[in-house]
Image: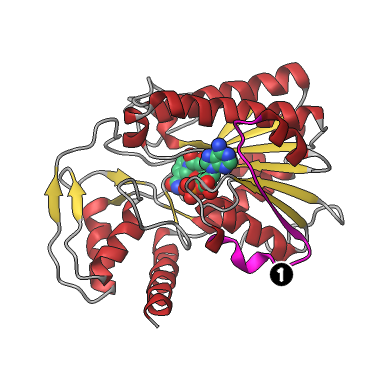
């Protein structure tokens, strides 16, 4: 739904940075399914070989273990590539508050290296992962491009700065860049593990293990939870967008609004659990409410975003439940 009929030039080659991560591995899979070549660049700092293990037998797939902080690696990785889908970065607002220096180097310098290398190697389109966190303390809803506030975390600042580089690389060097502001993405292969894991996979895993999940705050925070298929569609459509739409940022979401407490009970009920959640303190740097106006991406990228939260969560629960069964077997 949304991208199965997309056609690129025969033999097109895509570089997916962060391709061993959650979003990157789904991008690699979709491009391989469409029949095009994929090079995955990843340093495996937060990604996993298991996410891409199934692709190694496909002759259209190659893996390069490397770090976008190293410019020579970026130059080598972009050689011969038509499209770059740059996902490599560290996520998590709270972790960025603990490690601001690392975030600046990894997310900003790494992205600048990738843009410069893409320019040097005449890449056609440079599509990159930004984030809804760039809206910062701007309270109005829905979030709309051009109406941003002050950012609330080093992570958000890395995305805002990268967007500015994207704008400059288009205006100064005519590299077609597209910043995709993802809103709370979820779906298969998102890691449930670690202190900084996203809530949906983390709660599913805890509930499957009969553990009591913690909700930070009162659970009345709302988010525009976005199913991974919408994000894949947006990346592929951006690769085909016109140059007049480059140098800009786009909200990528479904356009809905889900409350954390409701999501908790959807997950618990689907998994047949009646475990009450624990409540912890609010998290610093978090935005209380977030939902997206997606009209700009629809108009300029031809984005449809047709996977609703309800459709996506059903798929995600089924995937995690069967992955858990495979691990136990
Ligand atoms: P992820 O951690 O699963 O994937 C990121 C991948 O990038 C990992 O495989 C990691 O090993 C790799 N990586 C990190 N630093 C690297 C470096 N220096 N060199 C090479 N590889 C490196 O996270 P994700 O959820 O798939 O996020 C992908 C992108 O989308 C990130 O840029 C993130 O900031 C952005 N984003 C994600 C969400 C979300 O809800 N998941 C929301 C907004 C934005």
- Determine which quarter of the picture holds residue 127: top right
In the visual, does 305 lie left or right of 268? right
In the visual, does 49 lie left or right of 64? left
Inspect the magenta stretch and tell me whether residue 241 lies in it.
no
x and y percentages locating residue 76 in the rendered image: 76, 38
The one nearer the camera, 295 or 179, is 179
In what element is the residue under mark 1? loop
- Determine which quarter of the picture holds residue 179: top right
> Which residue does the image show at 77% across and 28% down from the upper left?
119
From this viewpoint, which residue is outermost toward the top?
172
26 vs 252: above or below: below
85 vs 22: above or below: above
> Which residue does the image show at 54% across and 26% down from the upper left?
108
> Which residue does the image show at 50% across and 54% down from the upper left?
22
241 vs 213: above or below: above
Question: What residue is disc 1 on?
Answer: 57
In the visual, does 217 lie left or right of 13? left
x and y percentages locating residue 29 in the rendered image: 64, 62
x and y percentages locating residue 90 in the rendered image: 47, 38
- Determine which quarter of the picture holds residue 193: bottom left
The one nearer the camera, 124 or 5, is 124
Residue 252 seen from this side: no
> Which residue does the image show at 41% across and 59% down from the upper left?
309
In the visual, does 203 lie left or right of 169? left
Quadrant location of the N terminus in the rendered image: bottom right
Range of residues picked out in magenta: 51-70
x and y percentages locating residue 167 in the rendered image: 64, 22
């Amino acid at each position: 739904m949304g991208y199965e009929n997309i056609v690129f030039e025969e033999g097109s080659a895509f570089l997916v940075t962060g391709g061993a991560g959650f979003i990157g591995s789904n991008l690699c899979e979709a491009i391989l399914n469409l029949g095009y070549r994929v090079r995955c660049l990843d340093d495996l700092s937060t990604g996993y070989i298991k996410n891409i293990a199934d692709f190694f037998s496909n002759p259209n797939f190659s893996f390069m273990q490397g770090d976008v902080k190293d410019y020579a690696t970026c130059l080598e990785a972009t050689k011969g590539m038509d499209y770059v889908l740059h996902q490599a970065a560290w996520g998590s607002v709270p972790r960025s508050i603990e490690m601001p220096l690392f975030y600046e180097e990894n997310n900003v310098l790494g992205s600048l290296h990738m843009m410069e290398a893409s320019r040097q190697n005449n890449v056609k389109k440079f599509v990159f992962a930004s984030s809804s966190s760039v809206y910062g303390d701007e309270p109005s809803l829905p979030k709309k491009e051009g109406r941003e506030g002050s950012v609330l975390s080093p992570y958000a600042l890395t995305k805002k700065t990268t967007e500015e580089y994207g704008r400059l690389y288009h205006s100064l060097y005519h590299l077609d860049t597209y910043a995709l502001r993802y809103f709370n993405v979820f779906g298969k292969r998102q890691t449930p593990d670690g202190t900084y894991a996203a809530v949906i996979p983390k709660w599913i895993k805890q509930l499957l293990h009969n553990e009591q999940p913690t909700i930070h705050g009162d659970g009345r925070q709302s988010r525009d939870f976005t199913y991974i298929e919408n994000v894949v569609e947006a990346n592929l459509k951006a690769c085909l967008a016109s140059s007049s739409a480059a140098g800009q940022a786009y909200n990528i979401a479904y356009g809905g609004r889900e409350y954390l407490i409701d999501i908790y009970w959807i997950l618990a009920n689907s998994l047949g659990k009646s475990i009450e959640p624990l409540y912890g303190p609010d998290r610093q740097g978090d935005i209380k409410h977030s939902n997206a106006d997606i009209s700009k991406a629809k108009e300029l990228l031809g984005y449809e975003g047709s996977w609703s939260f309800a459709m996506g969560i059903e798929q995600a629960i089924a995937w995690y439940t069967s992955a858990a069964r495979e691990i136990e077997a």
